[in-house]
Amino acid sequence: MALDEGTVARVAHLARIRVKDERLKPLAGELDTIVNWVEQLGEVDTNNVAPMTSVVEMQAHWRQDAVSDGGYSDRVTGNAPDGVADPEGAFYGVPKVVE
């Protein structure tokens, strides 16, 4: 597939990328090379290849799907500026925004 300058300009416009006119021809050549490589991938026989999500065989780590507060609210609220953390230490105090 040969990409011309008009196609590159259209793709650049759709991608909201500003490309100067003098860069269109070299960019067309570069993009044409990339498209040719992608087309070559379509020629590879992948009928007996299992789909994969990683190049390394691994098992996903599962955890119990349970709601919790994390158990360390004092460390979280300890990062708050002075006067913002609740005196009880478990919440942030914020100004009232709705009357």
Image (tube, grey):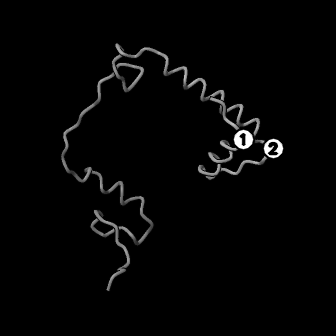
The answer to whether the residues at label 1 and label 2 have Cβ atoms under 8 Å apart is no
Q: Position of residue 72 (x, y in %)?
A: 29, 52
Residue 25 tag number: none
Mark 1 to mark 2: distance in Å?
A: 10 Å
Q: Is residue 63 above or below residue 52?
A: below
Q: Position of residue 64 (x, y in %)?
A: 19, 39
Dot 2 crowding, Cα within 10 Å, few <14, some 14–19, many 20+? few
Q: Write down the residue under mark 2.
A: 22
Q: Residue at x 34, y 13 (%)?
A: 48
Q: Which quadrant would residue 96 be assigned to in this image?
A: bottom left
Q: Is residue 65 above or below residue 87?
A: above
Q: Position of residue 91 (x, y in %)?
A: 30, 65
Which structural element holds mark 2? Answer: helix
Q: Which quadrant would residue 28 be assigned to in this image?
A: top right
Using residue 38 as the reference point, say whether residue 7 is left or right of it.
right
Image quadrant where one finds the C terminus: bottom left
Q: Is residue 70 above or below residue 84?
A: above
Q: Which quadrant would residue 89 be assigned to in this image?
A: bottom left
Q: Write down the residue under mark 1.
A: 5
Q: Position of residue 43 (x, y in %)?
A: 49, 17
Using residue 90 as the reference point, say whether residue 45 is left or right of it.
right
